[in-house]
Image: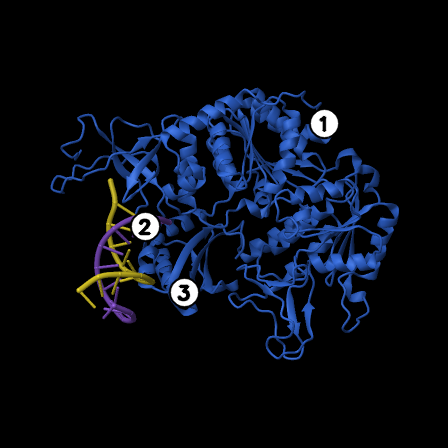
Chain colours: A blue, B purple, C yellow
Amino acid sequence: MNLPPQAAPNACRVAVLVDAPQHSGLSTALDYLADQPLPVGSLVRVPLGARELLGLVWEGEAPLPEPDAPPLTLRPVSAVLDAIPPLGAAWRALLVFAAGYYQRAAGELALSVLPPQLREVSPAQLQAKLKKLHKARVTVPTEATAPRPELTAAQQQALAPVLAALQAGQAPPPFLLWGLTGSGKTELYLRAAEVALAQGRQVLVLVPEINLTPQLEARFAQRFAGVAMATLHSALTPAQRLQHWLAAHLGHARLVLGTRLAIFASLPELGLIVVDEEHDPSYKQQDGARYSARDLAVYRARLEQVPVVLGSATPALESWAHAQAGRYQRLDLAERMGGGALPQVRLFDMNRLPRQPGVTTALSPALVEALRLRHARGEQSLLFLNRRGYAPVLHCDQCNWKSDCPHCSAHQVFHKADRTLRCHHCGVSQRVPRACPSCGNADIAPLGRGTEQLEEQLEALLPGARVARIDADTTRLKGALHAQLHAVHEGEVDVLVGTQMVTKGHDFRRITLVAAINPDSALFSSDFRAPERLFSLLMQAAGRAGRDAAQAARSEMWVQTWYPAHAVYQALRQHDFAAFAQAQLTEREAAGLPPYAHLALLRAEGRDVAAVRAFLLAAQAQADALAQQFGAEVLVYPPVPLPVARVANVERLQMLMEAPQRGALQRLLRAWLPQLQALKRQHRGVLRWAVDVDPLAI
DNA sequence: CGATTCAGCGAT
DNA sequence: TCGCTGAATCGC
């Protein structure tokens, strides 16, 4: 070891991961001096340049003798956060895998999944937090545990293999719990959790959205009175997030509930992982390290030899294919609790409406009539339109001006409530012009419709009905969503209008009619996953109706469409996910798409399209050369602009890589990324680039 | 990433 | 000649 002469005689060298992106050239651990050996996984504070930052002690490389090199003067570790135990081997293994698989520096990933506040605390502050945590620990609520409902025969059958796996204490294949909305999946999660908790293990439950944590939290809290729970999601305050993370890490919290970032929670006694709504796209992180929390859950479960349950009414086709191949074990919950039927799906053919030039309504007369009928009967209806605002664009029919965003290749959306034009991509907002900015025509008109307009039309068409709207605009304020959902539950709303926000998980008891107003646009998306997503969205929306068994029989789901014969709608009409999945998988196999091929994207951004394209073309040449060199079957497609090519005056292009084998793609990426870093330096116009492994949309 | 350094042109 | 601004470079 080359130690500076003034070093203490027993000083030793420790490798430390710090937060530095891979293109910084500091992608591996840095070496520091410590007074004594520090256990791997310890959190430390280290100096780097003029800063002091949080670091994670890592497996050090063998010390190099470097006989002739000038003696490397290592800087000492500034502080050791030894009040908390080091991060465990399983957690570190998960991190190593994720960093390698998603092509990020381990330090960057580690620091991005640890609670942000850890970066700022001194050992003394951490000590204080721990004291507070220990105090809070004795005040776990201890109301009586809610009685467990009897399991149906189907539930018992589905649960048995999970319980067997928990008892056996070894790694079973992942379970894919395929259960309709309202079929009692949550009860199975509760039963499995009960067993794991009784075994003295920790349980991790992932949900796709923050909005869904409170209700699930309430369900678990009711059942497991006296069991310490912690939630982990990005809406927590920094202090809360650190407290909850610490509670999990110290083993105080036995039940951890959270969104995708919770997959990286430190859980020293993990015994079970549940991923609810496993098909949900929110499980894929969309910036920074683009990991899939669902896929990492499967990896982590295998690593730690614990069962993992993936639950969904419409599983991701990847998961479905795994189950068919026998790699996952499928558990079916085919019937709704209490014998409730799924709503009858009615496809309303918009072509049958008489064409009235100039007059457009999103609402067919038949639908309005159906809404009127529900209202008269005192039942609730839900209208689903996946587009917020009043109209997606303003238009001048004299000069053909459109409300284009000056900074993005997208239209500015007309919001009538506050008379603004807003770009949903870059966020710019301006007042609605009184006349056409291009030709002065005073008669500029909204084109198409969003939820605001739908709400307005419903109020006009259904006098006396109480119409409410739930979308990102009406729920901006904290607690607003909860208050609005409460109003629906209390029967203060007759017709609810909403974006996909309302289709997820909320248990509306009195809704007997769900209508999708204009879902067709998803059919023509260039994204190969669009049909899968649409099916799942509509199935989920359908699941909002008839959750009360007494009303289930007369519950309906309406789909207004110009393409009633489309396979997605036909499968939906039959409630036949299995047939739909099979058809989609057949198409995917023929087209060489996931799960039959593995994809990665290289995205690049810059002010100038040509510069970005030149970079990607040079990158393509590099990749092709590497593929040749490895003899790897990796196909690199030419760069193309993203569907929204320009956002906030930045041009965005991407390039697709496709390989029949995961390993081939991984090897190529590993060899390629360092070359790309060098390449970027030669291409000045490129602001940023990033690799997305297993992208959701291409 | 963020702190520091250095090149380049504009004002005094 | 001083001085501000943006690109390049380093950091164990």
Tell which residue pokes out farthest to the left in this image: A68
Q: Amino acid at mark 1?
A: Leu
Left or right for A505, reference A81: right
- Mark before the other along the chain sequence, 3 or 1: 1
Structural crowding at the residue carrying mark 2, measured as other residues with C-alpha within 10 Å and reported as few (<14), some (14–19) or many (≥20):
few
- Between A478 and A268, the residue placed more toward the observer is A478
The chain containing the residue under callout 3 comes to A
Quickly name the residue at label 3. Answer: A612
- For the question of whether residue A508 can be seen, the reply is no
Indicate the position of residue A687 as horizontal and vertical percent values.
39, 60
Marks 3 and 1 sit apart, C-alpha to C-alpha, by 58 Å
Based on the displayed image, in which of its 4 quarters is residue A255 positioned? top right
Marks 3 and 2 sit apart, C-alpha to C-alpha, by 20 Å
Q: Residue at x 41, y 34 (%)?
A: A93
Point out which mark residue A151 bears: 1
- Mark before the other along the chain sequence, 3 or 2: 2
- Between A638 and A281, the residue placed more toward the observer is A281
Quickly name the residue at label 2. Answer: A24
Q: Amino acid at mark 2?
A: Ser
Left or right for A59, reference A576: left
